[in-house]
Image (cartoon, rainbow, N blue to C red):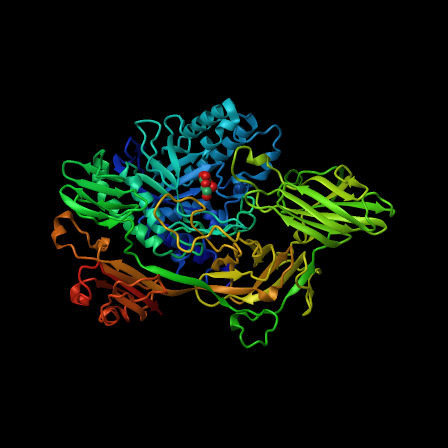
Amino acid sequence: MAAGTATPLLLLLSVLCFVGASRAANVTYDHRAVVIDGVRRVVVSGSIHYPRSTPDLTLPWRRRWCLQMWPGLIQKAKDGGLDVIETYVFWDIHEPYDFEGRKDLVRFVKAVANAGLYVHLRIGPYVCAEWNYGGFPVWLHFVPGIKFRTDNAAFKAEMQRFTEKVVDTMKGAGLYASQGGPIILSQIENEYGNVDSSYGAAGKAYMRWAAGMAVSLDTGVPWVMCQQSDAPDPLINTCNGFYCDQFTPNSKSKPKMWTENWSGWFLSFGGAVPYRPTEDLAFAVARFYQRGGTFQNYYMYHGGTNFGRSTGGPFIATSYDYDAPIDEYGMVRQPKWGHLRDVHKAIKLCEPALVAAEPSYSSLGQNTEATVYQAPSVCAAFLANIDAQSDKTVKFNGNMYKLPAWSVSILPDCKNVVLNTAQINSQVTTSEMRSLRSSTQDSDDSSITPELATAGWSYAIEPVGITKENALTRPGLMEQINTTADASDFLWYSTSIIVKGDEPYLNGSQSNLLINSLGHVLQVYINGKLAGSAKGSASSSLISLQTPVTLVPGKNKLDLLSTTVGLANYGAFFDLVGAGVTGPVKLSGPNGALDLSSTDWTYQIGLRGEDLHLYNPSEVSPEWVSDKAYPTNQPLIWYKTKFTAPAGDDPVAIDFTGMGKGEAWVNGQSIGRYWPTNLAPQSGCVNSCNYRGSYSSNKCLKKCGQPSQTLYHVPRSFLQPGSNDLVLFEQFGGDPRLISFTTRQTNSICAHISEMHPAQIDSWITPQQNAQRPGPSLRLECPREGQVISNIKFASFGTPSGTCGNYNHGECSSSQALAVVQEACVGMSNCSVSLSSKNFGNPCSGVTKSLVVEAACS
Ligand code: GAL
């Protein structure tokens, strides 16, 4: 069905999916918490950035309307125990006016409201966020007299104008809590305190102005400034980091808030893949609430995808998965999502005490700490072992408690442990993006998945050097961003050299060419042939390329293709970092050198194929050649093919292994830059990361020596029934026959529960029922609706070892384990098995035993 025919259906769905506003709420704060309608609230929040996923309401043929990306993500966040969704507002995507599709901020905020959750709207409008230019539109750089993020009239006028526009748009749609909408908080600026000293007194003046400007917009809800220890009243200064338990706000009347708890870390092209262990993240969260915090936000709860050219950097990868509780494809990441859900439940059980009492701290011995929230009728306690090595046994209120190293136990009644952050009761799910091998050329190959049989590839050659009429010629080398205004990643620098034969920079016909560039990627062509290339990296984008070149008598053409890979987004004066060839550009030989830096250069912004909209399949272009013998492994080629979307609802990604570097479009929508040949360093990874001890962004890395990113998400809403178009621009050279489509497949669900674990948190009803609390149990649930557990691949009760997919029996092992688990689970969508001696007998006494299970669903 064509999108145009869907309008009445869409309207109906809008009505079904979007419920109306509720009554106005009064949002304030005091020294303990955000206060909603006079009630202090303990809040769990998570970041989901609207343009990093899709609203998915454009495809009427897709089933399960309200469960697709935005509503689905928000529902999973709600099921995971979140109260608030946080998003930045990305200025560059909204101006000139654009609030459509993935940019439909109002729709996103309403989708959150529909799920019954609140919104924290971080307007910035500087946002950092690994987003191109930190979210600033690049045209802002060209406003006469402008200086960013300081006491500059031109900048302040633009910042105020955009901030007002966002606030007015939200007010117009009735979205502030003061109007009955979901927005309970807003942020102005972003971590300015990290850099303001570089801006001197003018920086301080700007920060105070920003605060005053925000407050004057009269949203009816509080404003925050993150990482701004001197944020003026009434703005709340908040903390960002891997841990914020030691943070204190700058006034006794402000609550302790954590706006960015980094659930993992971002990926760079050329970097290894970061991940953050679940136990450590849970520890950080519990410590924060233990030490008086009442508002915590996961950055990110769903990271998503940097579509198009939205990545910052330079060198930020297209995937923004972030090892978040919901993965890039929108699927819950287990056990992270499930364990944090349990942590949130445990904290919520403590909420009556947390909002009623002040924390009281005491030491239980070295590296251990108890915090008690005692009010007349309620009591909650947190027991922490912050030792990175040793488990401890502590005495608290007359009872003994075992605390694993680097963990917090939560006691909603000051007596019973409902959760320990290092003891994961949630299941583990292992899944992979499995290849549907597509040989897009040899369609008679019987191994082809039928849906992917395609019509072969067409190609178009992107010419080397200047081909556009509007090219400009100037003496000297121009900075790239000032020249392109980021209209394209690409800038050609072109000149020519006349050779007589006796030049001092020549050795016969040879010379050495040196080119210095601010980055990010450089390719050098001599007389139309590639003579060398180089790239910078996330830690330094600088390039110094040296290559021997051969020149011919007469005129020689020198064409430099300089490419940006996302504009800088962080640091003082990040907007002025620049890119492109700075020089020198120099030829040298045995008897001298020729410096070309000040010669006349001709500049072309962007590619011819970009001007011709080759990425847009609906525009017919004579450039395309259909020939079975298309070129491979050559730079600067556009490729195009048709394909049928993989059947079903499973998330889809393209595996670009075999290609070099480029950008890809599905039905005209860019799925981002791909760069599978950019490899992570060989070293720095760990096989299994010890969660104990302070985490940092390079502590737990995987995929060393491998491509940083091979898989590129194609949201289902980019696909259509029948024929789809895939267009690539390949910059370095690759073989599109090697591209394959992949879909998400779950391999196994597993769980590993010890007798030391507390019971599943749902079994907690009231403190009065403590006496009947059950013991630990193992729970499994198939990830998809309609699935049942079809097979128990492994079960062991005793002292088993290993990880999901790789379990082994230990010396001690009950002979009943497999039969008991099969009996309880096979044929069920979910099941629960108690670790009782009734079930398993006692295969070895005096030893702490565990139950591990690996199961398959179908
Ligand atoms: C913070 C920043 C975020 C994001 C994060 C790293 O400093 O506020 O926007 O960039 O770092 O992912």
Q: Quadrant of residue 823?
A: bottom left
Q: Residue at x 55, y 69 (%)?
A: 438
x and y percentages locating residue 566 in the rendered image: 57, 45
x and y percentages locating residue 346 in the rendered image: 25, 47
| Residue 22 seen in this snapshot | no
Which of the pair 329/393 is nearer the observer? Answer: 393
The quadrant in which the C terminus is found is: bottom left
x and y percentages locating residue 599 in the rendered image: 78, 38
Image height of 300 relative to 444, above or below: above
x and y percentages locating residue 664 in the rendered image: 58, 56
Q: Quadrant of residue 808?
A: bottom left
Image height of 94 relative to 225, above or below: below
Q: Residue at x 38, y 31 (%)?
A: 237
Decide if residue 107 is on the left or right side of residue 286.
right
| Residue 835 seen in this snapshot | yes
The image shows a total of numbered marks equal to 0
